[in-house]
C-alpha cells in the first residue's frame, strides 16, 4: 500500500484512541530571523510532542533516519518514530529516535 494509506489509517486509529493528531504539518526553517518554507512536511504530529515519519520501503536507509532527525532538530519535539510498514512484523519496522534537550547530544534508541 501507499504511505498515504498507512498515514490515513494510523491517524484514524490514534484519533480513536483520543490522541491529538495532525497530518502533513508544514515545518518551516528559521534562518537569520526569517521563516523559510523549504517544503518539509511532518507526516503525523501526535499530541504536539511526537513526530511520526511513515515509510513503505524494502529497506530503511540512513537518509530516512536523517530526515526524522532533521525534523526533530527543526521542531520543538524531542521524540520521533520512523515506521516502515513494508516488513513482516511491524515491530521490526519501528525506530524510535530521541533528540536530547542538550542539542549537542542526540540519542537513538531501538524500539
Image (cartoon, helix red, strand yellow):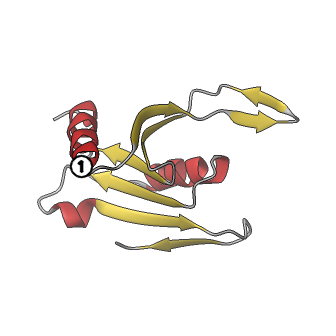
Q: Is residue 20 left or right of residue 94?
A: right
Residue for point 24% across, 49% down: 58
Image quadrant containing the N terminus: top left
Q: Is residue 65 left or right of residue 32?
A: left
* Residue 89 x %, y %: 14, 63
7 up-or-down from 64: above or below: above
* Residue 40 x %, y %: 56, 33
* Residue 46 x %, y %: 42, 49
Q: Quadrant of residue 30?
A: top right
Q: How many numbered marks are there?
A: 1
Residue for point 26% across, 60% down: 93
Q: Front-most of 18 and 56? A: 18
Residue 95 visible in image: yes
Residue at the farthest right position: 32
Q: Residues within 10 Å of mark 1 (few under 14, many from 20)?
A: few
Residue 56 visible in image: no
Q: Is residue 101 left or right of residue 66?
A: right
Q: Front-most of 43 and 57? A: 43
69 up-or-down from 101: above or below: above
Q: Front-most of 51 and 67? A: 51
Residue at the farthest left position: 88
Residue for point 57% across, 27% down: 39
SS assignment at label 1: loop
Q: Front-most of 61 and 72? A: 72
Image quadrant containing the C terminus: bottom left
Residue for point 30% across, 62% down: 94
Which residue is disc 1 drawn over?
Answer: 58
Amino acid at each position: 500500500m501507499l504511505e498515504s494509506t498507512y498515514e490515513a489509517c494510523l491517524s484514524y486509529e490514534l484519533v480513536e484512541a483520543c490522541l491529538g493528531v495532525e497530518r502533513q504539518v508544514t515545518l518551516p526553517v528559521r534562518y537569520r530571523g526569517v521563516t523559510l518554507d523549504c517544503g518539509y512536511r511532518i507526516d503525523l504530529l501526535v499530541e504536539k510532542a511526537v513526530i511520526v515519519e511513515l515509510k513503505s520501503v524494502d529497506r530503511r536507509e540512513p537518509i530516512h533516519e536523517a530526515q526524522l532527525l532533521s525534523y526533530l532538530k527543526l521542531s520543538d519535539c524531542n521524540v520521533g518514530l520512523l515506521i516502515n510498514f513494508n516488513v513482516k512484523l511491524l515491530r521490526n519496522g519501528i525506530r524510535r529516535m530521541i533528540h536530547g534537550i542538550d542539542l549537542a547530544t542526540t540519542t537513538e534508541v531501538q524500539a
